[in-house]
Amino acid sequence: MTRKAKVAVFISGSGTNMAALLYASRAADCPFEIALVLSNNPQAGGLALARAEGVATFALPHKGMTRPDHDAAMEAEVIRAGARLIALAGYMRILSPEFVARWQGRMVNIHPSLLPKYTGLHTHERALASGDSHGGCTVHLVTADLDEGPILGQTPVAILPGDTAETLSARVLIAEHQLYARCLARLVATLA
């Protein structure tokens, strides 16, 4: 059996995308495993889930630290865990350009819009306000420019009459959970 590529997942909150990656990784034919879950928020709900599932965790609040120092501390843990890739899963912190450059081509993110539309925050509100027929999600490689990296996959999600940001967000999250693991698996296969 081929060894699975080790992935570190960065989270800031509940970690539902991390959980989707973790459970997908348990399939025999999945080419990656989650080696470490890291957070800038020690109270992030996803940390407790990762620990319960037997995955190593690391938390370091960024308050009072420079961005490069915090990134370096997080990166040291990623390297210690032997991870070859980083998956950002609701990590609500912009990474330094130097950190991003060191992981170029090996760091992915999931974003709740059909990029290049609606980078940044409030994506569902913006899609609704624009009268779009679809919202959706995108998995992309991370570059120094926010939500601008090469797209690895997208899933459109229909906007229904009467949708709110919350109802659209709930359906997009289901699509995110399906798309992220597939795109990460394809990326791992190209790096093998």
Image: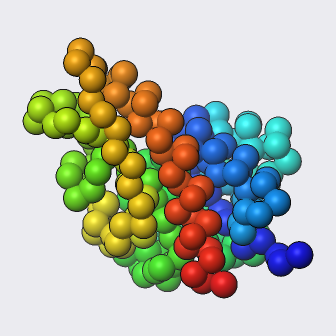
Give the image quarter of residue 3: bottom right
From the viewer's perspective, is residue 113 above or below residue 106?
Answer: above
Q: Nearer the viewer, residue 171 or 83?
A: 171
53 left or right of 174 in image:
right
- Considering the image in quadrants, where does the C terminus appear? bottom right
171 left or right of 185 in image:
left
Residue situated furthest right in the rendering: 1
From the viewer's perspective, is residue 141 above or below residue 52?
Answer: below
Q: Residue at x 34, y 45 (%)?
A: 156
Give the image quarter of residue 4: bottom right
From the viewer's perspective, is residue 43 above or below residue 92?
Answer: above
Q: How is the image coloured?
A: rainbow
- Considering the image in quadrants, where does the N terminus appear? bottom right
36 left or right of 141 in image:
right
Q: How many marks?
A: 0
Residue situated furthest top in the rendering: 162
Residue 24 coordinates in the image, percent (x, y): 70, 51
Q: Residue at x 63, y 77 (%)?
A: 189
33 left or right of 66 in image:
right
Q: Residue at x 51, y 52 (%)?
A: 179
Residue 126 appears in the rendering: no
Residue 121 coordinates in the image, percent (x, y): 28, 43
Q: Nearer the viewer, residue 163 or 59?
A: 163
From the viewer's perspective, is residue 4 above or below residue 116?
Answer: below
Residue 131 coordinates in the image, percent (x, y): 12, 32
Residue 123 appears in the rendering: yes
Q: Nearer the viewer, residue 59 or 88?
A: 88
Residue situated furthest left in the rendering: 130
Give the image quarter of residue 87: bottom right
